[in-house]
Image: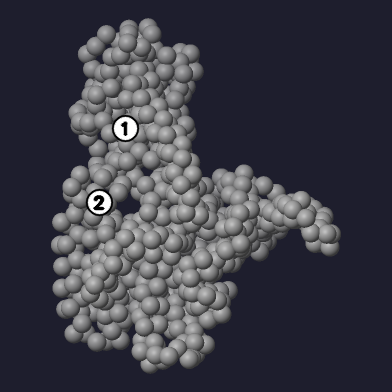
Amino acid sequence: MFIFKDIPFLRICLPFVAGILVAVPLGLNAVALPLFFVLVLIGVILTWLKSSSLNKLLFFLCADAFLFCFAINLSYSCNIVKNKAFYGLYAKKDSTNKMIVVIKDLPVQKQKFVKCELKVLKVKTKTGYKNTKGDLIGYFKNAQLTNQLQAGNVLLINSKLLEIESPKNPYEFDYKSYMAHRQVYYTTFIDSGAFAITPHAAPLSSLWLIGLKIKKHLLWNLKNSELDKNAYGICAALLTGYDDDIDTSVMEAFSHSGTLHVLSVSGLHTGLIYLVLSFLFDLIDRKKKYKIIKFVFITGCLWLFALVTGFSAPVLRAVIMFNLLGFGKIFFRSDYRNQINILLVSAFMLLCYNPFLIYNIGFLLSYFALFGILFFQPIFAKLWQPHTKITLLIWQSVTASFAATLSTLPFTLFYFKQFPLWFFICNLIVVPATFVILLMAILVVLKVTPVCKIINFIIIFLTSFINLFNREGAGYIDNIHFTAIDAILLSLLLIIITVGFYFRSYKYIIYSAIVLLCWQVNGLITSYNAKNKNYLTVYHLKKQNAFSIKNKKEVVINSIGIADFSFHVKPHLISFNNPSINGKAFNHVISRIKHFLIIDKQNLWPVTDYRNISVLVISNNCKVKATDLQQFNNLKTIVADGTNNRYTIKQLAKLCSKFGVEFFSTQSKGAYVCEI
């Protein structure tokens, strides 16, 4: 295809990325080394032979196979679980372990615990301490001693490893997979007397430690300034990526307005700094004679910014990306094809360093957003030619926002299940404002205290502005059921449209229509199945019970907290194609197929005919005796939800075994979903 001639690195990235996408989820082992030599040998022989279309095809197939196998081997070598030194191979899973760890990042203060990202250096075994590798999330009991925890501390801890659990409820966020893609598989809870700070030096790179010290210093200066609570949280996020102190309501408002991406130090801010530095240098060098000096100057400034932010991962990605783009502008034509090619080079380099980045939502959004700006924004900009500089600047900003939103749409809908309607207006105001806040936050760190009042005023204005759009229906569309199939079909549709624009061919309109038709058929089938089936669901929550009944018209759910509902229950209800949701307490459900009875209060059994009950749900450690079960003539299943402790579950399992009744525990099996 001609597109591979103009953007050759796309030809390299496709089989390489395909190899990662196959190897990581399947956990494939490394490909035998002799296969690499065979592929290289075939490629060399084909280049010596007389050129022909068949030889070229064979050469490219050989190169694709080489890149595919290379990606599999790379994924295998980077997978810490496959490493013989992985601490999980030596630590005991059923008892406490003595481990020597180092705190990798700044501790995060929670309500009851201090959360730390730990690097496991050694694990004590029967033969002594074993050198190990791998990361671990530690939760230290919030006591006075935890105030001494600092990034870089080497600790001796004595605790039990807990494997991160898979999601227990339908469509719930898969935290286990999310952490696995970050190479973290275990957590541990550490009592205040179960750890000691050792005098050993941290085995971390000196540059990384410098970055951590700078990050800590920045946060301390911001926190001890005249910034109010919201202003401090936002400035901390913009400068260092530390967003744990931002109020939840503020985060939701930014998310609903389509501007959540500005609340973290990211490629956006790095790109704005790059553009500002480039503009300032061009004012001095109007004839553009000193391109190399400009490149060195901007590169140095960007790496200084990365150092100031504590080497935040998104900033490092962005700095590498913009360094390569700046390098490309010197030695190559500055058209979108070369820029996209350089963008792919930077992505290839980062994936070679860490193949698991392909599953990082920040990585995907930053690269696809920049691709949209490079490819779609010029197309959108040509639709109208403003006559004044101000309107031109506004139009370019609006088209860039549309381009980035279009290219990242499959990911945002799949991961966030919502769509902001007024994102282009919000970004027009919020992006420049947050860039100003970022620059002023640096002045706050430098003790220029008068700017604190300005930042406080801007933050109040911004939060008031985005709250105008924080209204479901009028400001954003929520509860969008968007599956992986939807994301794949939408991505395919966007790819066909992109290729169609590239080749200026109308035949791609037909291809787009076919994909759109398939997407609509899939949506109709999914919607029909969601609306015409009735379910009773017992969700797994540890602190309170949650039940729902779904029929063709509505979903009835018992009253639960907003946080638990949003995280554990709401994703499942979204899959029912937006039925009306009503809160109502219930304990007896009668359907054509089964009768359900819910017992959630001690010694309080509802007055009903127990002979017809086929499913009994036990909650809140309610006691059930053998004499109680003798009243049930048609009992088939007993369900124990997450509010029951281990003793209650064990006793219920014994009763079920005695009476020949199926036992279902949400603790081990996840939510109980039954068609009624």
Q: Position of residue 669 (x, y in %)?
A: 47, 31
Residue 577 on image: x %, y %: 31, 32
For the point 23% across and 79% down, the residue is 225
Tell me the number on the disc at residue 577. 1
Q: Which residue corresponds to the image point at 37% horizontal and 68% vertical from the top-left?
A: 268
Label 1: few (<14), some (14–19) or many (≥20) C-alpha neighbours in 10 Å:
some
Residue 25 visible in image: yes
| Residue at image point 27% right, 57% down | 423
Q: Could you say which disc has been placed on residue 421 in the image?
A: 2
> Looking at the picture, which amino acid does disc 1 mark?
Asn
Amino acid under disc 2: Leu
Q: Secondary structure at mark 1?
A: loop
Q: Earlier in the sequence, mark 1 or mark 2?
A: 2
Front in this rendered view, residue 305 or 598 = 305
Q: Is residue 249 above or below residue 269?
A: above
Mark 1 to mark 2: distance in Å? Answer: 20 Å
Q: Is residue 565 left or right of residue 183?
A: left
Viewer-nearest of discs 1 and 2:
2
**Observer-nearest of 131 and 416:** 416
Dot 2 surroundings within 10 Å: few (below 14), some, or many (20 or more)?
A: some
Which numbered circle lies on residue 53?
none
